[in-house]
Image: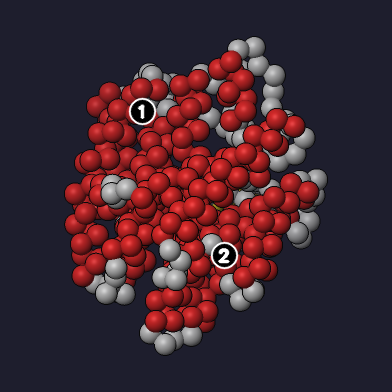
Amino acid sequence: MQTASQTQRIAAIDTLRGVAMALMLLDHVREYFYLHHQVVDPMNLDTTAPALFFTRLASHFCAPVFVFLTGLGAWCYGQKMAAQDRDERRETSRYLATRGIFLIVLELTLINLAWSFPLLPKMLYLQVIWAIGLSMLALAALLWLPRNGQWLLGIAIVAGHHLLDGIHFLPEQAAYPLWAILHDRSIIELNWLAEGLKARTSYPLLPWIGIILLGYASGPLYSRATAPKERQLWLTRAGIGMLALFVALRGLNVYGDHPRAPAASLLGEAMAWLNVTKYPPSFLFVLFTLGLALLLLARLEKGRPWAFFQTLGRVPMFFYVLHLYVLRGLYLALTAVFGATQGERFGFNAVWQIWLMAALLLPALYPLCRRFADYKRQQAGGWTSYF
């Protein structure tokens, strides 16, 4: 039987995940309905309006939160296995491997179909679900390291992967596909699989392995032996420390991301400071996003859980697949009614319309998520655990 503190601890994790999912919905509305004014990474401050910049910035928190909490969730799963007198690490490794493979297959099928829609696309987009799936496979092996080794390796990857930025391979070299997956955002030719087929490695993997490993290494904070106040204090200190290091490194402007550009106004200066690289996630990107996430995680555990976001956070993959197909359906329907409004696409005229659509869609999707969350709780341990 769970105690009140244990329930609150789990609710905080689900709630943080739910908040990240809401921000993800906002960004995917932008992807569907503001593609005529696409934002690349790093964002071009000379051509990107502040409203669009900060809308895109809000979504930066999603992937780090998902990946970190995936590692933390894997540790919590291991504790359940230990409580049943089962081999904790072996069962957790099996859990990570099966779900990692499931996510990779899901990315290559249902999720790619939602984005591109032809049954036989010419381009496969290897995005966040692919990265999480591969990170889970990596963690299935790395969890056998001692705890200190997990911390050291996770920090070394997240903070040190920039040292590999000068390494590149040509498409005809044997190492090119592997390096494209691990570090370089590139396109891989897959003619051996189907004529003209390509894959874009949108989420270079290496830093995400570091993040999921740090999430797993943080697991003991969520053991029953750790007092809630002790955990909240650690999360708060870690969050403040990460943000302080972000400010220091961004101020020095010598490591951790591309140098910030000079700006002519206070707003421009703020945008330059926050214009951090997501693909692959830079050290400064991780410090900024996870620093704020840890502070919010500590705060959520102190107060009453936000039931709305907590429910979303309990069914992450269900929400992910559902919202993509709803957005695709809406886009096709609005295009059929109004035709192309932005070049060859249907699109919004202003950024505020992105926020309005996201605000309307979120409560519209909630009843289905709540119903599936209830069903998932009743069918604990079955196929629903993959969603």
Residue 354: image tag: 1
**Quadrant position of the N terminus in the picture:** bottom left
Above or below, 235 against 243 in this view is below
Q: Is residue 111 left or right of residue 276?
A: left
Q: Quadrant of residue 331?
A: top left
Point out residue 337 in the picture as x, y percentages from the top left corner.
24, 27
Residue 326 visible in the displayed image: yes
Three-letter code for the amino acid on which mark 1 is drawn: Ile
Residue bearing mark 2: 217
Three-letter code for the amino acid on which mark 2 is drawn: Ala
**Quadrant position of the C terminus in the picture:** bottom left
Above or below, 222 against 326 in this view is below
Residue 332 visible in the displayed image: no
Q: Residue at x 51, y 67 (%)?
A: 220
Q: Residue at x 23, y 59 (%)?
A: 372
**Considering only order in the chain, which callout, 1 or 2, is on the residue closer to the N terminus?**
2
Q: Is residue 256 left or right of residue 44?
A: right
Tell which residue pokes out farthest to the bottom in this image.
85
Secondary structure under the numbered disc 2 in the rendered image: helix
